[in-house]
Every structure is written in C-alpha cells, then in structure tokens.
Amino acid sequence: MSDHVYKQIELTGSSPVSSDDAVRVALNKASKTLRNIHWFQVTETRGLVENNTVAHWQVTLKVGFRIDD
C-alpha cells in the first residue's frame, strides 16, 4: 500500500433544482479538468428567494483530489 497526497480546493456550484444538484454541477465541471477527485465537504449553502419560494441554490464545497505519483 502506498502513501497518498491530496490537494484541497474550494468550489461553488449553483442550481435552480436543489442543493444536491448544485454539488453535482460543481463536481461534474471540476472533473473535466481535475483527475482523482476523492472527496468533498459542503461548507456553505445559500439560496435565492423569489416570490416567497427558493429560486436558486448555491453550495460551496471543499474538494480533495489525489496527487499523481
């Protein structure tokens, strides 16, 4: 078993559907340029209210990815 090193970045995803979808949007976009995404942690959730309903979700994540050997 080898040792691994991870880099951590912060991303913010948004979605009109849900906070879960905002997470998926951020991870999907990041996966187009980052390899070895291993974990995420939601650090902040915000929403936009229009006409007394949630119109948009915004979620900030810490994302960890493994550095290649």
Image (cartoon, grey):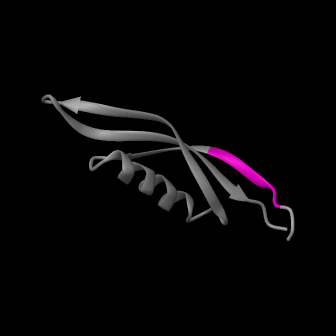
Which residue appears at 12% of the width and 30% of the height?
51
Which residue appears at 27% of the width and 50% of the height?
17
Which residue appears at 57% of the width and 50% of the height?
40
- The quarter of the rendered structure image containing the N terminus is bottom right
Extreme-left residue of the structure: 51
Query: Where is 27 relative to 16, above or below?
Result: below
Q: Position of residue 11 (x, y in %)?
A: 55, 45
Total labels: the figure holds: 0
Residue 67 falls in image quadrant: bottom right
Extreme-bottom residue of the structure: 1
Q: Position of residue 27 (x, y in %)?
A: 51, 57
- The quarter of the rendered structure image containing the C terminus is bottom right
Query: Where is 35 relative to 61, above or below?
Result: below
Q: Is residue 8 left or right of residue 48?
A: right
Which residue appears at 74% of the width and 51% of the height?
7
Q: Is residue 3 left or right of residue 64?
A: right
Q: Reply yes or no: does residue 62 show up in magenta.
A: no
Q: Is residue 16 left or right of residue 59?
A: left
- Secondary structure mostly taken by the magenta-highlighted segment of the chain: strand
What range is drawn magenta here? 4-9
Q: Position of residue 60 (x, y in %)?
A: 50, 39
Q: Is residue 55 left or right of residue 69?
A: left
Query: Where is 30 relative to 42, above or below?
Result: below
Q: Position of residue 37 (x, y in %)?
A: 63, 61
